[in-house]
Image (cartoon, grey):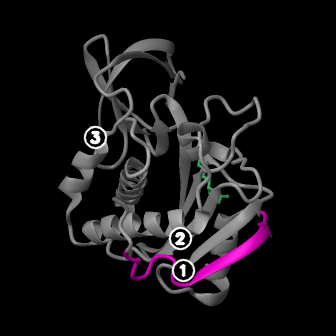
Amino acid sequence: MLKKANSLFIGKPTISLEHIDSTNVYAAELITSHKPSEGTTIIAKHQTQGLGQLGKTWQAEEGKNITLSIILKPTFLHPTHQFDLTRMVAVAIAQWLEDYIDKQIYIKWPNDIYVGRKKIGGILIQNVLSQGIIQYCILGIGVNVNQARFSSNIPNPTSFFMELNQDFDLPSLCNHMFIYIEQNYLALKNGRLAELNKEYHERLFQRDESQEYILSDRGKISGTIRKVEPLGKLVLEVDGIQKSYSLTEVQHII
Ligand code: BTN
């Protein structure tokens, strides 16, 4: 049963744009020019230069998908704990998807959202630090919703439509997602880290499975994901030895 409540501050206000290069870039400019309140959200029907992780682009067909950025002010978090925001939002999106899609939803480290072995969404977090504090966080979220076909250079996409064979109303989906993000953000603010970490690990893609990965220093290896460290490094066991890796040092093979 889908909750009918509303969020208290996420999405308030919402700035709706037809076309923009990237909602994350717009959010960064807004932070500089207007000092927006926490929860301010920028939603675009179409991004001309959507940003993905590791300098990649994020492609989404106009008007069919969720492409938005939420501005938070997590001044309570020490900059070394930025991964707490990744964990919190990945869990929120997975929990939200579980209300609709009756398949296993995974979080592919660090924050890709998968339905089974297919990617339905991604997150790009950009933090604004000053004076040793995270002054602002831009949570950029892209979720494939009503798109039925993807260009061949996107390796393993899926969408709400591809999973459920029906179209969805984007504003209602977003409002529902905002509730989960708000709940988990408040949980983080209130120190319920252990709970969020448990939720994250329960959904961690390929956890405890022997799989092939590409390591930047060793090439293709067979290894097993064991966990994600508190500050966000991936712990992979290779030949019985556990070692932690950062995002640029390990790649999944999908
Ligand atoms: C990834 O999986 O590589 C992250 C994708 C993040 C895409 C979203 S869409 C809304 C927001 N604005 C951007 O330019 N990127 C993020």
Mark 3 residue element: helix
As drawn, 88 above or below 133: above
Q: Is residue 203 left or right of residue 28?
A: left
Mark 2 to mark 1 CA distance (whole Å):
6 Å
Residue 207 located left or right of residue 96: left
Measuring 64% from the left and 65% from the top, which residue is drawn there?
24
Residue 212 drawn above or below residue 88: above
Task: Give the CA distance from mark 3 to mark 2.
Answer: 24 Å
Q: Which residues are magenta?
A: 5-21
Picture coordinates of residue 60, whole percent (x, y): 72, 50
Residue holding disc 3: 201
Crowd class of label 1 (few under 14; some 14 to 19; many from 20; radius 10 Å): many
The answer to whether mark 2 and mark 1 are in CB contact below 8 A is yes
Q: Name the residue carrying label 2.
A: 70
Q: Which residue is mark 1?
A: 40
Residue 32: say if magenta. Answer: no
Ligand 1 visible in quadrant:
bottom right
The residue furthest bottom is: 34
Of mark 3 and mark 2, the one earlier in the sequence is: 2
Answer whether residue 169 is visible to the viewer in this image.
yes
Q: Callout 1, which amino acid?
A: Thr
